[in-house]
Amino acid sequence: MNLNEIGSHAKKAARSLARAAAEQKTQLLNSLADRLLASAETILAANARDVQLARQAGLAPASIDRLMLNPPRLESIVADLRSVAQMPDPVGEIIEQRTLPNGLRVRRQRVPLGVLGVIYEARPNVTIDVAGLALKTGNAAILRGGSETLHSNRALVAAVQAALLEHGFPAQAIQFIDDPDRALVHALLQLHEYVDIIIPRGGAKLHAFCREHSRIPVITGGIGICHLFVDASADLEAALPVIRNAKVQRPTVCNALDTALVHRDVAAQFLPRLVEYLEADGVTFRADASALPYFPDGLPASVTPAGEGDFDTEWLSLVLGLKVVGGLDEAIAHIETHSTAHSDGILTEDEENARRFVEQVDSAAVYVNASTRFTDGAQLGLGAEVAVSTQRLHARGPMGLRELTTYKWVIEGEYHTRG
Amino acid sequence: MNLNEIGSHAKKAARSLARAAAEQKTQLLNSLADRLLASAETILAANARDVQLARQAGLAPASIDRLMLNPPRLESIVADLRSVAQMPDPVGEIIEQRTLPNGLRVRRQRVPLGVLGVIYEARPNVTIDVAGLALKTGNAAILRGGSETLHSNRALVAAVQAALLEHGFPAQAIQFIDDPDRALVHALLQLHEYVDIIIPRGGAKLHAFCREHSRIPVITGGIGICHLFVDASADLEAALPVIRNAKVQRPTVCNALDTALVHRDVAAQFLPRLVEYLEADGVTFRADASALPYFPDGLPASVTPAGEGDFDTEWLSLVLGLKVVGGLDEAIAHIETHSTAHSDGILTEDEENARRFVEQVDSAAVYVNASTRFTDGAQLGLGAEVAVSTQRLHARGPMGLRELTTYKWVIEGEYHTRG
């Protein structure tokens, strides 16, 4: 498999996509949606083969579940695609324009990023998700999905490429590295001549691998050690469902809560109540030494003393760290030390504390009186999301369509020369 | 020299800088300006030592010139610093805000990038330039200047650190790798835990080295193979001074012109005229085979046939490539193949051709009827510039103060939970 050729084709296809009108791209996505439904039988059969091989290979049930497609799941993928198709096209937007004193007319105008390299795990929905977002924004993409989804991805990418050709675009606008050889991931990360951005969608190991080996800028993210600080002034009854929502609603995702920090002045009242409230959902707790004295009758069965590293763990499960702090400064200091700068919040009725928390906590998303679960492109009004960035360049937090673009400067004059 | 320690101090100092009010930062920069003038004797003595060592080491006169400070040059550095001090502070700017249908108030607000890693060559002015831009935007910086400026940089950074301490900021906000060991450049590129962006300011080799070895996002740029296309409809007399300005005004910089593409229909009239016009400035030419027939009486002494690779060379000198093209499409295709996507322009009276050129040429700066020399932060109204980016993420073209910031999402609710 010649990755240089894939890269060079992608770059060429990107030029063609970049010139597409908004309406053409909308039609392309809608037509892909139709085609996916029409090819449902082929796609589901290919996926069934992947699932069968995964079972034989002894893949964990949770992984097999993520890998599996069925008619409702395919319909949901198609519905998402149609919704992206309807979104406004950011390409061509004028970010800023002005006429300089010398008469030069200067503007910055949005253009596609170019070629996206997306590396992900065994989730076939990501294939269509990324293809849709990339094409909507006039980008080409090189996809590298988990090897367990090889047959599903072949079938899905075949549908994408057929739709591209039908609409007069080069099929190579969306390419798929159709070879499970892991060395190809490394090779993809070297293609800086052709690929403009690497988006890893997976765990911490994948992100570290990309950061270490890539010659292309990498959007790292998707890893959240998230905190909520219950200030002394918080409405404690209102705080309970917020913490519950952040911890319980979908514990396996990056914006789920990992640690509750509780102000010392309300710890006696709040901590036992919080444990009782969340025990009903099956939550278990890792309590810092500072929290232990607030269970004077002995620790409930759900609470164990926190071990080393517990406050640096993204739980991705129904586990919650508990710590009592002396006040706002200690809460902020804990967050500074342990947060992955994804999503952190304060629950408070004190405006000055809210202001200081927002100013001093430097996470991609900082909350006042809301669940961390809102860190999501759809929830924050971006319509869709390609990744959640926890690095600082280009985009932070949820990345939507606009974050898949860059800009160029356009400067128009009357045979102007620089003095 | 413990780079981890430098990194950890820088990150801590960045937090302190990030909280500084705009007025504090303005005062800090003005106070640094005063201090540089007050320490002029020490600084110039340190610089004289560098110059002496460089002469003994046989450094080229051009390099020694870039390395040398004298009272007017120091005053000019100080004037630039005072001008940055007066610029509006982008930190805290609200990029976007809205209230979502569920009542959540969401905004994106500018914050400093964090810690900048800046690697540059033997130019002591860059030390103060970067320190000023970093501090103005609330960032910390780790500087790695060329080894030939060791003594100058020591004296300059001492002044910066004294000013920081005087204003109650940690001295480690601006640190300098005070050891010429080249392995430390590589080590700096590994500090992803502490450093948020790498800005190389130097030649192609330095950029390639950073791209290859950095685990931190790198702003590559500063390398321009720049084109102007003289369309058949161009005002040919007006085109001459534009090409002259782009080629001659400062040939050693990245936005200087490298290749003139001339439409076949005006080549007979324009090419000999252009050569004659620029010969007076000492320009010599590398003519593509397509251009040779337009000198029917034999090539002028200043014109030689272009050799292999000439159109892929950033000349940085009074050399200009010449090529005749059949029309707009061929001009665009040549640019697509040979441009470094820095600055490319069209000279034309044809609005449709101008529109197509702007749409299809995907360079950081695309010009209509103006010299490529305007690709510069000060010229385009940014006030200052930390680099010119030719990569596509985060910022393209000249990067000013705003491009040294990122943003955070601030989400405020009334104990909102996600449904």
Image (tube, coloured by chain):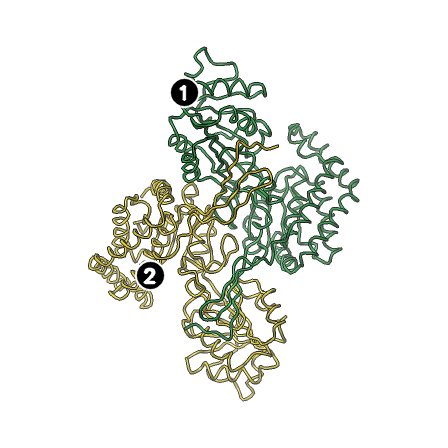
Chain colours: A yellow, B green
2 and 1 marks in contact (CB < 8 Å)? no
The residue singled out by tag 2 in the image is A80
Q: Nearer the viewer, residue B106 or A277?
A: B106
Q: Around disc 1, counting alpha carbons within 10 Å, would you say few (fewer than 14), some (14 to 19), or many (20 or more)? A: some
In-image side of B205 versus B418 (left or right) = right
Identified by mark 1, the residue type is Ala
Q: Secondary structure at mark 2?
A: helix
The N terminus of chain A, quarter of image: top left
Q: Secondary structure at mark 1?
A: loop
Query: Disc count in the image?
Result: 2
Q: Around disc 2, counting alpha carbons within 10 Å, would you say few (fewer than 14), some (14 to 19), or many (20 or more)? A: some
In-image side of A115 versus A285 (left or right) = left
Label placed on residue A146 = none
- Spatial separation of the CA atoms under disc 2 and disc 1: 54 Å
Considering only vertical position in the picture, is A237 above or below A80? Answer: below
Q: In the rendering, at what x and y percent does residue A366 appear?
A: 53, 66
Q: Are marks 2 and 1 on the same chain?
A: no
The C terminus of chain A, quarter of image: top right
Judged from this view, the residue extending furthest toward the bottom is: A297
Query: Closer to the observer: label 2 or label 1?
Result: 2
Q: In the rendering, at what x and y percent does residue A160 appear?
A: 28, 51
Q: In the rendering, at what x and y percent does residue A353 appear?
A: 62, 72
Q: Which chain contains the residue that carries disc 2?
A: A
Considering only vertical position in the picture, is B343 above or below B112? Answer: above
Q: Quadrant of residue B264?
A: top left
Q: Which chain contains the residue that carries disc 1?
A: B
Q: In the rendering, at what x and y percent does residue B133 appear?
A: 64, 48
Q: Nearer the viewer, residue A92 or B116?
A: A92
Judged from this view, the residue extending furthest toward the top is: B297
Label placed on residue B289 = 1
Identified by mark 2, the residue type is Asp
